[in-house]
Amino acid sequence: MIRTERLRLYPASWEQMDAMIASEQDEELKKAYTEMLEGCLRHPDQWDWYAIWMIEKTDGTHIGDLCFKGLREDGIAEIGYGILEEHQGQGYATEAVRAACRWAFLHPDVRSLEAETDAGNAASQRVLEKCGFRPNGTYGEEGPRFSLAPIEVKNNILTAETFIELYSSVGWEPPCEAQVRVALQNSLAAFTAVENGKPVGMVRLIGDGGMSFYIKDFAVHPDYQAKGAGKMLLHALEQFIRDSIEPGWAVSLELISTKEALPFYRRMGFEERSAEWDGPGMMKMLR
């Protein structure tokens, strides 16, 4: 089962799918449901990849369905989804598809996801784009096809040019290129989030390597925010530190947050310094 703030998703049982087929009035949907059930029966060891996934609100209200249509040998899985009309326009489709994509990419054999929409279904296309899918230039029986590749995090590939581009994308005024090059050369590590070869986020780590580490220049392109890139960057940075220190050492990981990013850092386990027993964080710019 997949849980989100408002939803829960789970693969339907044989009995549930059989009941859906029996009650469905739309012949095209009945045919699709039947094919999915037959896929489950042919591949019982991959039930989740062929089953209809139920989309429910946390109170148990059924609001839609989702499916993966199997996992191919080339590592590509196709995703399909639908939200009942009375529940559309409330962000449920985007929330469900994002959660399903995160679940799918936990599978080591998944290389990318694909989806197909009706050419005139702008709402469905917006859902895919919000979830990071991009048109792949091909068309299926229904219309244009979209692809989503997993975001990867790589260490020490960040260039000054990419740094300035990502820095600027979040509205910050970047330093000059020469200054960025010096900063990158003297960083302990610089992590870059990449999707389909395109850098979409970055974070730098500086520190003494023994007691204190500091997060700098943590930026994710606005088009890729709230899609897991930030969490992946931070996880990679923290793992780098754990791999660098001796067993039993405790070190501090520090940062200065923007107001907008405070909820994210709190969710990731960071705590604000208490002004009751300690002074506030301070900084001074030199020119």
Image: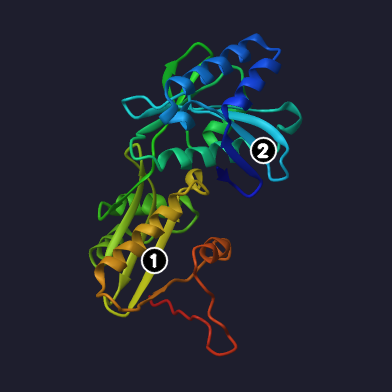
Q: Quadrant of residue 8?
A: top right
Residue 87 image position (x, y, % from top left): 73, 33
Callout 2 amino acid: Glu
Residue found at the far front of this picture: 15
**Does residue 256 lie above or below 51 as drawn?**
below
Q: Quadrant of the N terminus?
A: top right
Q: Quadrant of the C terminus?
A: bottom left
Disc nearer the start of the sequence (1/2): 2
Mark 1 in CB contact with mark 2 (< 8 angstroms): no
| Residue at image point 73% right, 38% down | 61
Decide: few, some or many residues near mark 2? Use Cα within 10 Å; few <14, some 14-19, many ≥20.
many
Q: Which of 160/147 is in front?
A: 147
| Residue at image point 23% right, 63% down | 185
Residue that mark 2 sits on? 56
Which numbered marker is on residue 216?
A: 1
Kindly tell me whether residue 189 is visible in this rendering.
Answer: yes
Q: Which of 75/221 is in front?
A: 75
Mark 2: secondary structure:
strand
Q: In this rendering, would 89 be left or right of 252?
A: right
| Residue at image point 49% right, 80% down | 281
Mark 1: secondary structure:
strand
Residue 265 image position (x, y, % from top left): 51, 64
Callout 1 amino acid: Lys
Q: How many marks?
A: 2
Residue 155 image position (x, y, % from top left): 27, 55
Foreground label between 1 and 2? 2
Q: In this rendering, would 194 be left or right of 144?
A: left
**Does residue 179 lie above or below 36 as drawn?**
below
